[in-house]
Image (tube, rainbow, N blue to C red):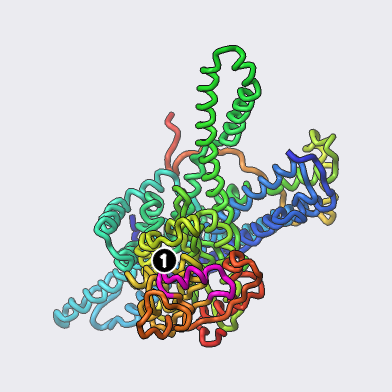
Amino acid sequence: MTVPITYSLLRKADFAALEAVAETWMNLYATLDDQAVSLVGLKSKDDSAFGTDHWEGPSSEAARDKIRDLVLALDERASAARRVSVAIAVAVEEFKGAQADLNEVVAEIDRERVALTEAGSVIPDTSRGTDNVSYAEGLSSRISAALERAAEADEALKAAIGVWAETFSESERLGLVHEAADEADELQDLIDAGASPERINEWWNGLSEAERLGILEGDPALIAGLDGVPTDTRDAANRSLLEAELDRYSPTLDQDIADVQERIAEIEGNWSEIVASGDPGESAEELEHLRDRLAALEDERATRDELVNLQDAISGQARTGQEYFLLGYDSAEDGKAIVAVGNPDTADNTVVYVPGTGGDLDGASGNDLARAETMALDASQVPGSGETAVLVWMDYDAPNHPLANSPSLSYAEDASAPLASFMSGLESTNRDPEENTTTVVGHSYGTTVIGQAASEHGLATDQIVAVASPGMTVDQASELGIDPEDFYATTAPGDIIHAAAESGRLGADPTDTGVNWDGRQTGVDWDGFGGNTFDSDAMGSDPIEIHSNYWDANNPARINMALIFTGNGKEAT
Amino acid sequence: MSEFSISPEHVRAGAQALFAVSEAIYESMKLVADDTAKLDGTVEAAGFTGISECIEASRAWEGDCIAVHRADIEELAMNAAVCAETSQEVDGDVSSAFGQYTDAYFPDGRTAPAPERPGPDPSAQLPRGERVAV
């Protein structure tokens, strides 16, 4: 509920002290973030102070577990401090703006036509005609608008501090959620009606901050994976859901597994005696039941561990010093996740990396995330490039096996619409999409996904990069919905993917200049895929390893990609 | 479970690093608290509910949230310190042993006060503005 701000208060208010407080919260954020990194450094390597080279045994393991807990706690607290700082800074700007509006009205007032009271009431001088009445009404209306602007900013600040600094009592928190219930219903209706990410973003921006926070607090699942919702908000929603999901796992899960294993070992160890007793049926039944239970518990543990790994992976800072943002995750089956290194809404360049065969939740918090960090780091080395945010988009069911699954187009077809929607969402949440350089880069089957999405739906991207592509479901770059000059491809010599690409099964080879491929285009005037190609090294002799070596140190593919991502593709070799 | 082994100089350095982390966090939190205190009692704090919430936040973080994190960090530092200075055999005497080595970890005296884990305040367990029924 908005609390009115009085005329006299806004006139004399000084926000300098509040502005300074915003800075100290940002400083606290930086400190907490830095100290979390320091804590990670105590155990990150075997030869770290608390690493296994220097400390072994139960006490060391407890210490390393404790450090993990501390890092997560500080990381969460740092994120909250950052949000508090931003909320205060935004409020200060709004307060000052409202004050300036008010001062402008006061300065303009013609004192011969109206009188202004200390409470801000405008009294027309009716002795000189009725024109002054409407003049006074106009001034009153502007004064009211300025006061209302300040009151809305005040309400937003209170809600933001209450949520992020956790100063709200439970009843206040529920009140915030309750106040936003109608908006949450409205959003659900929009989703059910298939609203585009642009429409979602437009609607979201029309809400007050208190309403946005009310939805986030009340139903984070509603917005966690919703394209068009700003990155920072999706991140908060997903982290909240991830923590809640991890909390649902039994704290005795590991011990339960150990107990079942012990009982199985006991029965198996006594099996000859059980058989000799003449009636092994009951024990056989128990053994079967225990094995089923063990399998179920181990599956549960595997999923929990994947989620723990994800939580660890997105805590602290990336090697670039950028923050991680979790834009979506799903623990079902192989698992999915969308993780950003840097905030794509505010970055100068945005890169969306689509992994290929074998991609899953583990990869999104492991090897694929490491590749994303490498690409962000490389891009940061290009002079004058600004900030480059790199996202791992692992929001599709990728083929598990290169021979059994990858030749199928079905995975790409299923991923096509979600990728297109995600890219549209990124475009709508970016603060300056005209100036931002956006690139979608795929590796292996990820390029097939990109090709399918680009040709079927169109992708909101400036450039497309194909690394080690088996085919992009099209015959030429011009079918990807972008200027072919903005298309780049590379496949290293000796990469095993050459065989798949040259088969033409998933479309023409994107690196083909017209001389290699003679599949479906036999007899056709074929002049190559089009676009640009750039260099990459094999970095080895094993065709399978070559396929994964593009992000290795000293591979020229890295600097070429960095140039492309930062809008300097003409310099790529 | 792996066998116990320890390199005291490394673990000692780790414990000292933990105390440094705690102090850095204290200093940064103190800045927030000091600057926010300047808002207390002002017309702005009285008239803007958001500004008074900022004061509330600073108090809550200084007296509770950050204090608890620092206490956890220093507790770990103490345990690591004792492990570094003693052996596995005296592992059971952790708390009393720490006092013996405290000076070695703060040769010049610490600049930040030791953190205190806040005791549970019954009134804080209730929603603001609500009271226990009597």
Instruction: State the residue at coordinates (51%, 69%).
Output: A499
- The front one of A205 and A196 is A196
Q: In this view, does A251 lie above or below B68?
A: above
SS at mark 1?
A: helix
Instruction: State the residue at coordinates (66%, 45%).
Output: A65
Range shown magenta? A491-508
- The front one of B14 and A545 is A545
Residue A40 can be seen in this image = yes
- The front one of A95 and A330 is A330
- The front one of A340 and B23 is A340
Residue A103 can be seen in this image = no
Pointer 1 residue:
A449
Quarter of the image for the N terminus of chain A: give it: bottom left
**Residue A264 sits in which quadrant?**
top right
**Residue A436 sits in which quadrant?**
bottom left
Mark 1 falls within which chain? A
Q: In this view, does A330 lie to the left or right of B102?
A: left
Residue B2 in percent (x, y) is at 76, 40
Residue B65 in percent (x, y) is at 58, 49
